[in-house]
Image: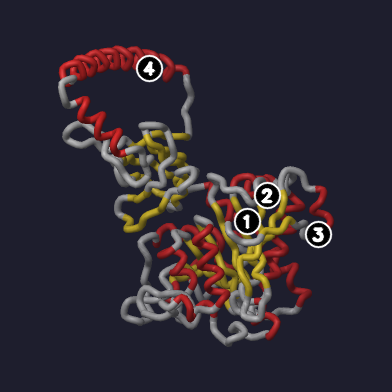
Amino acid sequence: MGHPRIWTKMQQHFQGIQGFLEWAISIGKSVNGFPLWVIEISDKPGEEETEPAFKYIGNVHGDEPVGRELLIFLANWLCDNHLKDPLATLIVENVHLHLLPSMNPDGFSLRKRGNANNIDLNRDFPDQFVFINDDEDSRQPETRAIMNWLRDIRFTASATLHGGALVANYPWDGSDDKRTKYYGCPDDDAFRFMSSIYSHSHYNMSSSKEFLGGITNGAACTDCRYPLYGGMQDWNYIHAGCFELTLEISDNKWPNAAELPFLWRYNKMSMLNLVASLVKTGVHGRIYSSGDGRPLPGSITVSGINYTVRAGNTFGDYHRILAPRDKYEVVATMPGYKSKNTTIWLDEGPVTLDFVLDPEVSVKGSVLRNIYDCDCNGESKQEFVQFLWGTHLEVFFVVIVVLGFLLLLFQRRQKVKFSTSRQSAGAKRTVEV
């Protein structure tokens, strides 16, 4: 990741856990030099995987400490219950979970909203509607640390934990005309679905009298000092490909310590179910080249939704959050390759959808080069092309005809085998196009 990494066991009882470790990472420092520690929980901590990554961030505002405490509760519970509780096992073994208990340790120590420079960190990010915070050097160190962190890790989803209300908030946080009104993003359905998972898993959030179903669009929230500009939630979605919620988890910003176990109990299933939803629904898969089978860092789009999800550079893996409904048309693209699309039915469970893309071919039949292909010796390629299209053209044509005939026979034989095997095979969850 490019950050110093330290193996750690957060408490002595973690030492008996088998099969996974906690991994603590400092992603930067606060104004006063406090490390911004991230706890990474996974069966393969510190390694890049094809699993979706999720992050929780607490204590964005210094005077809202409940989130930082609940994230410690969450880390303890997952470590205690891995291989004991099915939900804990599912998360540890299928999601790469990152917990940043305190984004604002200076504000916490000073017991104030802003950081040591008295800046509200949830107003310090670049904004799509207001041209503020565009100068990266003028941003707060905590803000820069988050932005650099998301350049290193491709998070699928995220949530920040706040206090002072009880509601799950989703983008957009602001509107184009600065008015308080419902202003949804392209993935409005998916965000409403995510917010409802948290709200309906909570002890009483969904029964809110202020917010229907315990969820709200940020720009429409009249009771949350919204709309706001420079927020982290919108920046995550626009610039990092990460679906982030803003969760208000306690009416009392700074409750008595004796109340923390109750607040953990009220939020426990919400926090767990939101993370688990990454692998319990949506579309997941990898993109490959048909030429050599290598993974491709292509793009995934869904017809009718103006948003692009990028596949990983190493494994070509992607994770697309979608609200369950009848069907979606999913399209995979990659420079230098022919795009492919297919229609899937997404009900309650996830769909695994792999794409195998064919290289684009020029009029003369040569494969078009792209920036992801190997940069071989250009002179050798030119000499080979001249050889083919020179005096040996007739021989080359005969060889192509023979190879084509053999390929046709092979395909017919494979079709017979395939049709026979399909009759005896059961339904598979993985689709390849």
Residue occupied by mark 1: 272
Residue 286 vertical position relative to residue 33 in the rendered view, above or below: above
Give me the C-alpha separation between circle 2 and circle 1: 8 Å
Q: Pick whichever, 129 or 324, lies toward us.
A: 129
Judged from the image, the secondary structure of the residue bearing numbered disc 1 is helix
Residue type at mark 3 is Gln
Cβ atoms under marks 1 and 4 closer than 8 Å? no
Q: Residues within 10 Å of mark 2 (few under 14, many from 20)?
A: some
Q: Which of the labelled discs sits on residue 369, or is there none?
A: none
Task: Say whether disc 2 or disc 1 marks the residue closer to the N-terminus.
Answer: 2
Residue at mark 2: 88
326, 76: nearer the viewer: 76
N-terminal of the pair, mark 2 or mark 4, is: 2
Instruction: Name the residue beneath numbered marker 3.
Output: 11
In the picture, which quadrant includes the C terminus? Answer: top left
Alpha-carbon distance for marks 2 and 4? 41 Å
Element assignment for label 2: helix
Q: CA distance from mark 3 to mark 2?
A: 18 Å
Q: Position of residue 255 (x, y in %)?
A: 71, 79
The mark lying in front, picked from 3 and 2, is 3
- Label 3 or label 4, whichever comes before in sequence order: 3
